[in-house]
């Protein structure tokens, strides 16, 4: 009787220690990584799960207490994203980087253990800054956009170039200046605030000032990318009061601009663009609606 009681008590006490958490390791997905490397990473993760105390690997998701999803991206370095799920609930998600395949192997060991045993994100959010190319930022956003707020890249813009007035009683050439602040929303869209000022090189009383919210659509995410842009805001124009005085030589109101051009070194921290833009005021002076056509070279940093 005593031996049986002893066996029962011992089994009862050791039962929690012998319980294994069943883990399903989903096939690893990747970007710029061949299928052979993805299979190797998949096997390495399963090995790490099996060697972790009280964890076991199962072959079916419906047999698992938890399952792990992994995504591997290869750019200049390797970026590893790993998520632990319990049903539809995300328990833990983290991101790790490795500079080489050799370093990736040890990174997988660390990432797997943290994913198995942590209940919160293992790493702080990576702030998106101008030290990363737009392609890297886009890949990071794919990894982090679903669960972390992403900060957009910001750039200051300064530009200048020749301008040409219409309905300003000053047909001579003018010079235009641009000051702006831009947020990179994604690979194809920029959103910003912009101020344009153009003044005649002959008539100092002929000038046009505009302040707008503008957006640009880029046709590619490469270093050299053509774009189309549009803006909406407020403009104020002073027409030249020459030998034939105008009844109303000033006007101000809402303004619309359209344009396009090419941006160079777009994926770098400093870039420049060459573009053309037409801005028109909705308000009219005695000649019509003032407008200015500008060709500008702009620097962005």
Image (spheres, grey):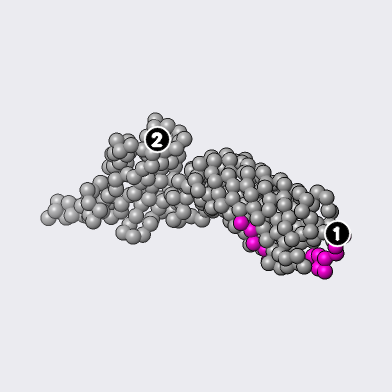
Image quadrant where one finds the C terminus: top right
Q: Earlier in the sequence, mark 2 or mark 1?
A: 2
Label 1 belongs to which residue?
242
Q: Residues within 10 Å of mark 2 (few under 14, many from 20)?
A: many
Q: CA distance from mark 2 to mark 1?
A: 73 Å
Residue farthest to the front?
244
Q: Is residue 91 left or right of residue 221?
A: left
Residue with the mark numbered 2: 104
Residue 283, percent from left and from top? 71, 68
Magenta range: 242-258
In this view, the residue in front, 195 or 25, is 195
- Whether residue 195 is in magenta: the answer is no
Percent x, y of residue 181: 65, 52
Q: Is the residue under label 1 in contact with that under label 2 (CB below 8 Å)?
A: no
x, y (%) of residue 191? 59, 55
Q: Is residue 258 left or right of residue 67?
A: right
Q: Residue at x 23, y 48 (%)?
A: 58
Asked which quadrant contains residue 106, the reply is top left
């Amino acid at each position: 009787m005593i031996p049986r009681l002893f066996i029962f008590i011992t089994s009862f006490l050791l039962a929690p220690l012998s319980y294994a958490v069943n883990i399903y390791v989903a096939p690893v997905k990747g970007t710029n990584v061949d299928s052979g490397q993805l299979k190797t990473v998949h096997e390495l993760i399963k090995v790490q799960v099996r060697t972790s105390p009280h964890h076991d690997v199962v072959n079916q998701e419906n047999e698992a207490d938890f399952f792990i999803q992994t995504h591997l991206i290869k750019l200049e370095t390797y970026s590893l994203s790993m998520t632990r799920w319990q049903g539809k609930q995300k328990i833990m998600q983290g991101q790790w980087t490795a500079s080489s395949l050799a370093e990736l192997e040890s990174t997988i060991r660390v990432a797997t253990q943290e994913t198995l045993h942590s209940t919160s994100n293992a790493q702080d959010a990576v702030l998106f800054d101008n030290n990363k190319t737009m392609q890297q930022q886009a890949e990071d956003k794919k990894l982090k956009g679903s669960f972390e707020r992403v900060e957009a890249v910001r750039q200051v813009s300064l530009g200048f170039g020749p301008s040409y007035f219409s309905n300003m009683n000053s047909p001579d050439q003018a010079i235009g200046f641009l000051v702006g602040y831009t947020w990179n929303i994604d690979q194809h869209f920029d959103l910003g605030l912009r101020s344009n000022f153009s003044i005649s090189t002959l008539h100092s009383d002929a000038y046009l000032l505009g302040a707008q919210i503008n957006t640009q659509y880029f046709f590619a995410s490469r270093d050299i990318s053509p774009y189309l842009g549009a803006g909406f805001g407020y403009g104020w124009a002073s027409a030249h009061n020459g030998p034939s005085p105008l009844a109303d030589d000033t006007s101000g109101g809402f303004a619309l601009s359209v344009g396009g051009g090419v941006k160079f070194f777009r994926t770098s921290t400093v870039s420049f663009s060459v573009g053309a833009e037409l801005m028109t005021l909705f308000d009219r002076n005695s000649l019509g609606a003032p407008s200015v056509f500008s060709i500008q070279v702009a620097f962005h940093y």
